[in-house]
Image (cartoon, rainbow, N blue to C red):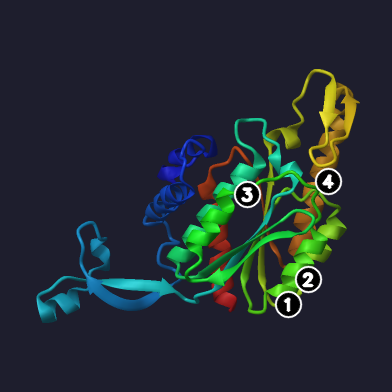
């Protein structure tokens, strides 16, 4: 999309307001969709409203103009006004960043954009933040976008993470079927991760997983011997990168492949991103998933 060059996470980090950042990304993304086959696929007519300067003239209702001699624009809404919640892992490991933006900040921007985009779709939005326990729980509501953005803005990481316990609490707390987007670096055994997300899936929710890592965590580009610190436990170990690089890359590749395979087997939508990728890639993945979900609802 032509707007991609405006959506680089490092550039976006200079924007102080999360709401402004989300609006910048989402509006640019939606403008890109005007030239995409996805534009208009999952919208139905809702109501008319008077034309305002700047409105897309393709939404003008010319039949109404012929009857009334006044300009009216057709308003649309999504096929389903869904309950949407972000499940945001804010454990200590999310603080890592090698290229000017941490996984936590990338996840912060992504969560804000998804919430803003979903509210544009007239969904009820909410958020859950967790490390080894649930920290914040904002239930889905049509009036909660501002609260969700405020919650995202004041997130701080630093504790140990645990995915299974918090997501079990979420499963028990969310009563209505929802679209749940999990944002995490998924530093757990695949079997543990699958137990956690499958509980959400089995209670009727549509689960979408965004797996976020820093490029250095995938490529392991380090050259010099150094002390490597666990951001959650504080433990340090001496590492000579050259002796471990091949084994590390093999294990990481196996971890990603295993997660992708098991998510697919459980019919859970899974996407992997590193923090150098523009945010519209993630939005397009979400929209693609949402299109599929709207067809099976």
User: Left or right: where does residue 95 sit relative to residue 248?
Assistant: left
Chain-order first, disc 2 or disc 3: 3
Corner quadrant of residue 265 = bottom right
Instruction: From the image, state whether disc 2 or disc 3 is nearer to you.
Output: 3
42 vs 17: above or below: below
Q: Residue at x 74, y 62 (%)?
A: 264
Q: Which residue is mark 1?
A: 203
Corner quadrant of residue 191 = bottom right
Q: Position of residue 145 (x, y in %)?
A: 49, 62
| Crowdedness near tag 2: few (<14), some (14–19) or many (≥20) residues, C-alpha within 10 Å | some
Q: Which residue is mark 2?
A: 199
Q: Residue at x 49, y 75 (%)?
A: 81
Chain-order first, disc 4 or disc 3: 3
Instruction: From the image, state whether disc 4 or disc 3 is nearer to you.
Output: 3
Marks 1,2: beta carbons within 8 A: yes
Label 3: which secondary element = loop
Q: Which residue is mark 3?
A: 155
Marks 4,1: beta carbons within 8 A: no
Label 2: which secondary element = helix
Q: Position of residue 88 (x, y in %)?
A: 66, 55
Q: Which residue is mark 4?
A: 254
Q: Position of residue 53 (x, y in %)?
A: 19, 58
């Amino acid at each position: 999309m032509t707007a991609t060059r405006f959506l680089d996470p490092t550039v976006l980090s200079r924007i102080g307001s999360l709401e402004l950042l989300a609006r910048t990304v989402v509006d640019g993304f939606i403008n890109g969709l005007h030239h995409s086959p996805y534009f208009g696929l999952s919208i139905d007519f809702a109501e008319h409203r008077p034309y305002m300067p700047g409105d897309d003239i393709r939404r003008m209702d010319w039949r109404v103009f012929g009857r009334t001699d006044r300009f009216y624009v057709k308003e649309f809404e999504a096929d389903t006004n869904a309950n949407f919640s972000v499940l945001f892992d804010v454990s200590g490991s999310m603080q890592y960043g090698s290229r000017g933006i941490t996984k936590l900040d990338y996840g912060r921007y992504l969560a804000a954009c998804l919430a803003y985009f979903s509210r544009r779709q007239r969904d009820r939005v909410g958020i859950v933040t967790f490390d080894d326990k649930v920290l914040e729980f904002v239930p889905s509501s049509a009036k909660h976008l501002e609260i969700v953005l405020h919650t995202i803005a004041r997130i701080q990481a630093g504790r140990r993470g645990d995915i299974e316990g918090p997501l079990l609490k979420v499963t028990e707390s969310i009563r209505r079927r929802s679209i749940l987007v999990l944002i995490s670096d998924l530093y757990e055994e695949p079997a543990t991760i699958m137990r956690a997300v499958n509980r959400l899936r089995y209670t009727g929710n549509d689960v979408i997983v965004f797996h976020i890592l820093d490029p250095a965590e995938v490529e392991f580009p380090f050259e010099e011997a150094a002390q490597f610190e666990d951001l959650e436990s504080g433990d340090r170990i001496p590492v000579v990168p050259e002796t471990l690089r091949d084994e590390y890359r093999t294990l990481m590749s196996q971890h990603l492949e295993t997660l992708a395979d098991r998510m697919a087997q459980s019919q859970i939508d899974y996407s992997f991103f590193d923090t150098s990728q523009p945010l519209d890639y993630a939005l397009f993945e979400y929209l693609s998933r949402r299109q599929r979900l709207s067809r099976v609802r």
